[in-house]
């Protein structure tokens, strides 16, 4: 009798310990993902921050108070949105689009409007309730603006599209008319690493951790548009996301 009672108590104790360990492990997974995401989001290029503030300052010196106020407000909103996003593992597409609009507005200011940009959201997508990891596209957008448009004769063009695939998947596309993957690699033969490769490497590592800890499947694809049509040049980046 005592043996059976001891066995029951032992079984209950082991079960409780197992439950506690599982819950602790899940909390640690979530904490790890949040910390990693905060680190990634905090790595917004310091040159971008400095140059944006310098550009705003130039409007102040030229007594263009309206433009200075406009871009300073955009910078403040971008900073607030990035801080908000860094506290969450996922954000709405609506929130992400707002963040990118402020980011692109400031980048356009920095580079004296040398490129055009547009953001398209498929009407089939509920942008307010569809959640995605924040700032996934930012490294590729930054790469296109700061490096991809160098060396092209025509005006830079950047298109970010949020496309509905089916009720379980959306796709984000970032398309530019920059130098493209092949020319970018040829420009850095010694190092073997170009800016696009570094952006891809960082993003793949992030996706690997999201897949492992969040169980969220995201497929990243890069296409050199010149390899499809020799008359074109640029890069197409695709994120297929399970929702």
Image (spheres, rainbow, N blue to C red):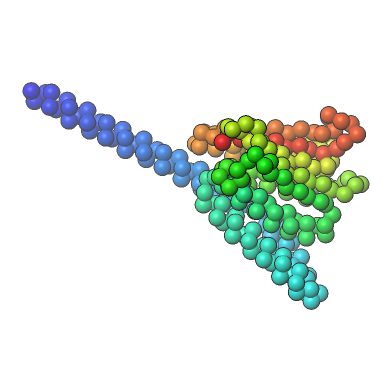
Q: Is residue 35 above or below residue 193?
A: below
Residue 194 can be seen, yes or no:
no
Q: Is residue 7 above or below residue 73?
A: above
Q: Could you say where residue 101 lies in the image, as x and y percent from the top left?
A: 70, 54
Residue furthest left in the image: 1
Left or right of 167, for residue 55: right
Residue furthest front in the image: 123
Residues 67 and 139: in front is 67
Q: Could you say where residue 118 lies in the image, as x and y percent from the top left?
A: 76, 48
Residue at left offset 82%, top offset 39%: 234
Residues 50 and 189: in front is 50
Q: Could you say where residue 85 lies in the image, as x and y percent from the top left?
A: 56, 52
Residue at left offset 55%, top offset 55%: 84
Residue at left offset 68%, top offset 41%: 122
Left or right of 76, for residue 178: right
Residue 136 can be seen, yes or no:
yes
Left or right of 41, for residue 20: left
Give the position of the N terminus as an image quadrant: top left
Residue at left offset 76%, top offset 44%: 159
* Quadrant housing residue 228: top right
Residues 168 and 113: in front is 168
Residues 106 and 98: in front is 98
Q: Is residue 183 above or below residue 67?
A: above
User: How many labels, in total?
Assistant: 0
Q: Is residue 112 above or below residue 24?
A: below
Give the position of the C terminus as an image quadrant: top right
Q: Could you say where residue 203 lies in the image, as x and y percent from the top left?
A: 64, 40
């Amino acid at each position: 009798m005592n043996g059976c009672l001891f066995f029951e108590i032992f079984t209950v104790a082991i079960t409780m310990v197992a439950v506690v360990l599982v819950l602790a492990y899940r909390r640690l997974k979530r904490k790890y993902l949040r910390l990693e995401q905060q680190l990634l989001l905090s790595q917004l290029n310091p040159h971008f921050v400095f140059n944006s503030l310098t550009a705003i300052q130039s409007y102040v010196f030229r007594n263009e108070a309206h433009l200075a106020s406009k871009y300073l407000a955009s910078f403040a909103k971008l900073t607030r949105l990035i801080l908000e996003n860094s506290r969450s593992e996922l954000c709405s597409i609506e929130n992400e689009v707002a963040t990118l609009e402020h980011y692109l507005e400031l980048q356009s200011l920095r580079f004296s409007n040398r490129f055009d940009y547009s953001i398209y959201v498929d009407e089939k997508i509920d942008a307010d309730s569809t959640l995605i990891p924040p700032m996934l596209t930012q490294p590729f957008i930054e790469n296109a603006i700061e490096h991809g448009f160098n060396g092209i004769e025509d005006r830079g063009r950047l298109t970010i599209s949020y496309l509905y695939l089916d009720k379980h998947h959306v796709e984000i596309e970032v398309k530019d008319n920059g130098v493209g993957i092949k020319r970018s690699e040829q420009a850095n033969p010694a190092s073997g690493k170009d800016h696009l490769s570094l952006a891809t490497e960082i993003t793949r590592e992030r996706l690997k951790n999201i897949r492992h800890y969040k169980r969220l499947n995201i497929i990243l694809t890069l296409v050199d548009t010149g390899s499809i049509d020799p008359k074109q040049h640029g890069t197409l980046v695709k994120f297929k996301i399970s929702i």
